[in-house]
């Protein structure tokens, strides 16, 4: 909640829905604890190196499938060669509930079967450039969960990294789902917002973002 009035559910674009304060405080703490376990390995959290040599400012750990630009694999050849942590059933259940609540359609969520999660940690200086989530062989929705510091989330269009786009403030506990016509929209995080942390989660500083996805890959 920001100020005195609750923030309302909002459809930012067709198929793209923001649900503020979706995770209650207990769920936020549980996810922070889970992310800490995943960050320890078997494939640890790291700054991903891009094909042209650049290094992402966010730190990332993967669950279920290992993502590297621009492919998924069960092991992490670009880190330590280990197999990534398994994708837990409870996280898939959370993803289905997120889709049901965002789209207000329980039936539509029953077929949602995420099998990977990317966990990104943003310190105060980290950002994410405009990009599409298109390494998956599936057009199932992406479920994004935010914990900790608030950020500016820039949600654009499917054709270009530039305007038109909409800037949305994502706070701790917020849910953002994008699918359907908006599944392959460009999006990014220009900045986190100082002084907006949520220490009650057990996260002293920074922002965690979990994105649940369906890879469409066999096995």
Image (cartoon, grey):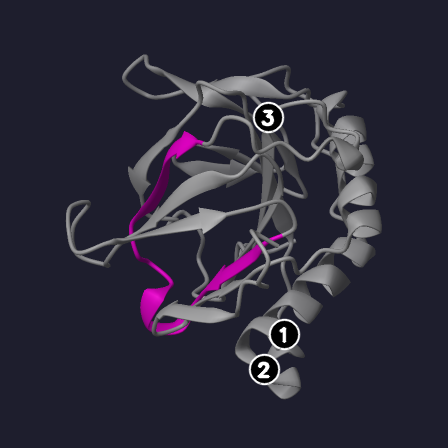
Front label number (2 vs 3): 3
Q: What residue is shown with label 2?
A: 104
* Sequence-first tag of 2 and 3: 2
Q: Which mark is residue 206?
A: 3
Can residue 214 be seen by looking at this rendering?
no
Q: What residue is shown with label 1?
A: 101
Location of the N terminus by quadrant is bottom right
Q: Cα distance, mark 2 to mark 3? A: 31 Å
- Is disc 3 placed on a helix, strand or loop? loop
Q: Cα distance, mark 1 to mark 3? A: 27 Å
The x, y position of residue 49, in whole percent, is 42, 17
Residue situated furthest front in the rendering: 4
20 w.r.t. 125: above or below: below
In the image: residue 136, left or right of residue 116: left
Q: Magenta segment, which residues? A: 174-192
Q: Are marks 1 and 3 in contact (CB under 8 Å)?
A: no
Q: Is 66 covered by the magenta stretch?
A: no
Q: Cα distance, mark 1 to mark 2? A: 5 Å
- Is disc 1 placed on a helix, strand or loop? helix
Can residue 203 be seen by looking at this rendering?
yes
């Amino acid at each position: 909640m920001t100020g005195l009035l609750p923030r309302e559910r909002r459809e930012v674009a067709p198929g793209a829905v923001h649900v503020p304060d979706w995770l209650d405080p207990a769920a936020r703490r549980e996810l922070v604890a889970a992310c800490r376990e995943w960050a320890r390995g078997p494939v640890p959290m790291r700054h991903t190196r891009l094909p042209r040599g650049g290094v992402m400012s966010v730190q990332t750990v993967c669950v279920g499938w290992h993502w590297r630009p621009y492919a998924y694999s069960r092991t992490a050849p670009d880190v330590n060669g280990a197999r990534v942590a398994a994708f837990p059933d409870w996280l898939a259940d959370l993803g289905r509930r997120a889709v049901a609540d965002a789209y207000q359609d329980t039936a539509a969520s029953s077929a949602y079967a995420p099998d990977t999660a990317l966990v990104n940690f943003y310190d105060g200086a980290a950002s994410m450039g405009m990009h599409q989530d298109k390494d998956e062989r599936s057009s199932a929705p992406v479920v994004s969960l935010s914990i900790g510091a608030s950020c500016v989330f820039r949600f654009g269009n499917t054709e270009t990294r530039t305007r038109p786009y909409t800037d949305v403030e994502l706070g701790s506990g917020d849910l953002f789902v994008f699918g359907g016509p908006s599944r392959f929209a460009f999006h990014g995080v220009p900045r986190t917002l100082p002084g907006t942390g949520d220490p009650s989660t057990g996260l002293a500083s920074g922002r965690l973002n979990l994105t649940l996805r369906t890879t469409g890959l066999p096995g």
